[in-house]
Image (cartoon, coloured by chain):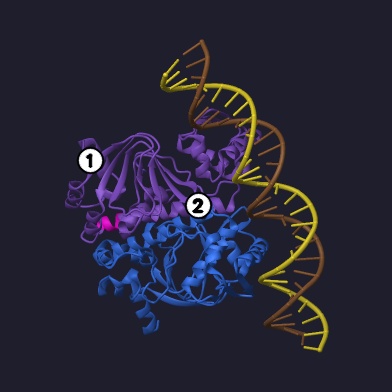
Chain colours: A blue, B purple, C yellow, D brown
Amino acid sequence: MRDVDVERVRALPLFRGCSNDTFRTLSAGAFLQRFPAGTTLLLGGDQVDFLYVLLDGTVELEGTWNDKETTLALLRPVSTFILAAVVLDADGLMSARTVERSDILMLSGAAIRRVMSEDAAFAVAVAQEMAGCYRGLVRTLKNHKLRGGLERLANYLITQRLRQGGDASFVLPHEKRVLASLLGMTPENLSRSIAALADYGVEVHGPSVTITRPAVLERLAKPDPLIDNHQPVTDELTGKAQRERWPLADDRTRAA
Amino acid sequence: MRDVDVERVRALPLFRGCSNDTFRTLSAGAFLQRFPAGTTLLLGGDQVDFLYVLLDGTVELEGTWNDKETTLALLRPVSTFILAAVVLDADGLMSARTVERSDILMLSGAAIRRVMSEDAAFAVAVAQEMAGCYRGLVRTLKNHKLRGGLERLANYLITQRLRQGGDASFVLPHEKRVLASLLGMTPENLSRSIAALADYGVEVHGPSVTITRPAVLERLAKPDPLIDNHQPVTDELTGKAQRERWPLADDRTRAA
DNA sequence: CTTCCGGCTTGATCTTCATCAATCGCCTCG
DNA sequence: CGAGGCGATTGATGAAGATCAAGCCGGAAG
């Protein structure tokens, strides 16, 4: 594992606050692996032995039932995944698959559990990361139960625009069929929904999107801070927990 | 606060492992309150100052958007709620409302955060509880994205039957319109779905349900351990985390 | 260059679900 | 006892979304 990768992991909110001892213990049994696109890292129901950290590439978390599949999340670096299963030493509820070639760090789950009870700061960080993931899922569930497909798409585009810097034009970060699954619709209906958004000032050509009249789109989308996390993605704000604390005043951020 | 209540809280997985000091600190600033039915405890977007522990009654967690409401969870004693917001010192994403008269213990959020960094065992317990809640939400999300309304209802009934002891007859624990919202459908469609399940050996009279041909119903419902948590509810298995670890062998349970 | 393939789009149709409206049963309160 | 109210049910209708079936387009391989 390269030093630069070690540093990236050490800087994660999950590990930033833990002791050097803790971090050494964890990284001792760790290994970094490069997977090609389309590799299944983990199948739902499998025993989970490692905490995964995505350092480069894209990973899809998916659920399956009755020969149907759905994308539950799309992860970009730097993200950890299946932390919940590791904490509880339980089987994974989702499958994980690389969407493109990805560099993934694997940390021993047993070591994580052991170290948690010895290093309170680390245990707190784990609790915070879990809380952030939990809140992300609450947002997703509300998004699906309260909004229709067109509204979900509109809000997705608004969020992407803000996360990519706020310009009128940006790029869809994933294949449309994957995006459709994430948004809970079929690829056909995603196509139609995109076409329908033309009336609201959304121009899509291949993967590139331009929002010409943001105000009009917002009137349709009705974004809501209790559902949509519009926080831009920066190097400073990488963990799920940090991203959930966002619009807090400084004093509260420091206090916690 | 009565001694018997203190004991119930102390016995929760969240507090069972923490030191006496920790527990004393937490219970010092705690107070128990009785709320009538229909009381809003917490509105989405509110600052969250307390961790709530439902000791008696029923609480509904709900989400709102664009004048629509949906219930995200229905809690029965003994359950904690809005732990994630407390851990991150963030605003609540959901509203909480009593469905019936409820006894609720309120613990200072600031004290919880403080105590976490001092007592690793407690921080671990918080992380585990959060992980359990997270997995519950993953199950819910898969349930909604992968199954249709009739299938969700069928699985709900199967789960209820098992949780209430496995008899052919049992009782719906909530009003049907609340149940409809939890299942993500309108009351009208819940009625129709219930009627449709008559063909699968489900008899419903008011709140009482009888499943005459479980095998037939299961063929429709296709329950899946990666979505449905069929674990019975006992005094021994009260926390969200415990309930997620269920089908594990003894040695794993002890190790963690 | 041409062919092939996979992802995307488009149209037609069907299923599912929401909505609107009316009724019924039950309980409460005057 | 009767009136009103609320939840549940049932029916009719419409909208949203899934499915099926072609076609389109662009990149990769031959």
> Which residue is at the front of the view, B57 or A205?
A205
The vertical placement of A208 against B42, above or below, is: below
Could you tell me residue B225's position as x and y percent? 51, 50
Whether pointer 1 and pointer 2 mark residues with C-beta atoms closer than 8 Å, the reply is no
Secondary structure predominantly adopted by residues drawn in magenta: helix
Where, quadrant-wise, is the C terminus of chain A in this rendering? bottom left
SS for tag 1?
A: helix
Pointer 1 chain: B
Pointer 2 chain: B
Q: Is residue A45 left or right of residue B96?
A: right
- Residue B6 is marked as 1
Give the residue at mark 2. B66
Residue depicted at x 29% and y 62%: A124
For discs 1 and 2, the disc positioned in front in the rendered view: 2
B46 is within the stretch colored magenta = no
- Residue B27 is marked as none
Could you tell me residue B168's position as x and y percent? 53, 31
Location of residue A52 by image quarter: bottom left
Work out whether disc 1 and disc 2 sit on a shared chain: yes
On the question of residue A184 being in view, the answer is no
Residue depicted at x 30% and y 75%: A24
Crowding near the residue tagged with mark 1, few <14, some 14–19, many ≥20 C-alpha atoms within 10 Å: few
Where, quadrant-wise, is the N terminus of chain A in this rendering? bottom left
SS for tag 2?
A: loop
On the question of residue A108 being in view, the answer is yes
Crowding near the residue tagged with mark 2, few <14, some 14–19, many ≥20 C-alpha atoms within 10 Å: few
Highlighted range, magenta = B121-125
* Label total for image: 2
Location of residue B190 by image quarter: top right
Could you tell me residue B23's position as x and y percent? 20, 49
Could you tell me residue A211's position as x and y percent? 56, 72
What's under tag 1, amino acid-wise?
Answer: Val
